[in-house]
Amino acid sequence: MSKKAYIFSQLFRDVRMNSGLSQWIVSVKAGTHLSNVNQIEAGHQEPRVHVAVRLVAACDVDLNSFFSKLTEEMKLCTSSERISPYLFESLKEDMFSRTPEPHEVSGYGELLRYCRLQRGVSQKRIAKNIHYDLRSLQRVEKGEQEPLVTTAVKLVAAIDVPPGQFFEQLWFFLSRIG
């Protein structure tokens, strides 16, 4: 496992332990298996982005703070400015007005694409800057592929959107669709 994935594991473990919740309680609240939580905390497994967001949210901690700290620990540079809330309003209306196709991994890719377009950054530039396969990025944005959490954070940082705020918005969407 990469050093960046290990950073997520340690940060998540600290948050869970500070919350006073057991791995079992967190797994139930997040809708995942206890063995997944155990493997993630041990640093043997890196979760996909949606599972990671649900796990952190299950610990009843501030997602903005958690993902901002993760970004800092991963030594990624992003803008420190907050994005105006109106930026996400039209996206929320669009995301909640349709039912996702069965093959779509909804939420992350759609939000990433929206923010990338708002920032005027090309897919090619992102892929090149973080050494990520362009076709994989295209599949992520279409909702056909879900990245691991550290890759998801790198993609968000590459479009210069504050990761904490991005993941708060993602949780807002995920909590609405279940």
Image (cartoon, grey):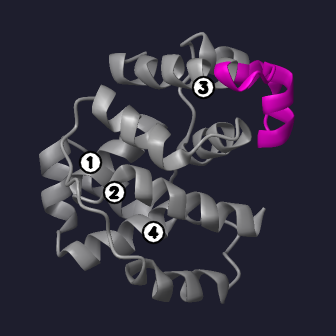
**Residue 8, above or below 149:** above
Whether residue 47 is visible to the viewer of this picture, yes or no, is yes
Q: Nearer the viewer, mark 4 or mark 3?
A: 3
Disc 4 secondary structure class: helix
On residue 137, the disc is 2
Residue 87: quadrant of the picture:
bottom left
Of pointers 4 and 3, the one earlier in the residue sequence: 3
Q: Is residue 133 left or right of residue 53?
A: left
Spot occupied by residue 79 in the image (x, y as percentages of width and height): 19, 55
Q: Residue at 47% across / 26% down in the picture?
A: 8
Q: Which residue is mark 1?
A: 133
Label 2 secondary element: helix
Q: In the rendered image, which residue does mark 3 sit on?
A: 15
Q: Looking at the picture, does residue 172 appear above or below residue 150? A: below
Contact check, label 1 and label 2, Cβ < 8 Å: yes
Q: Position of residue 130 (x, y in %)?
A: 19, 43
Q: Which residue is mark 4?
A: 111
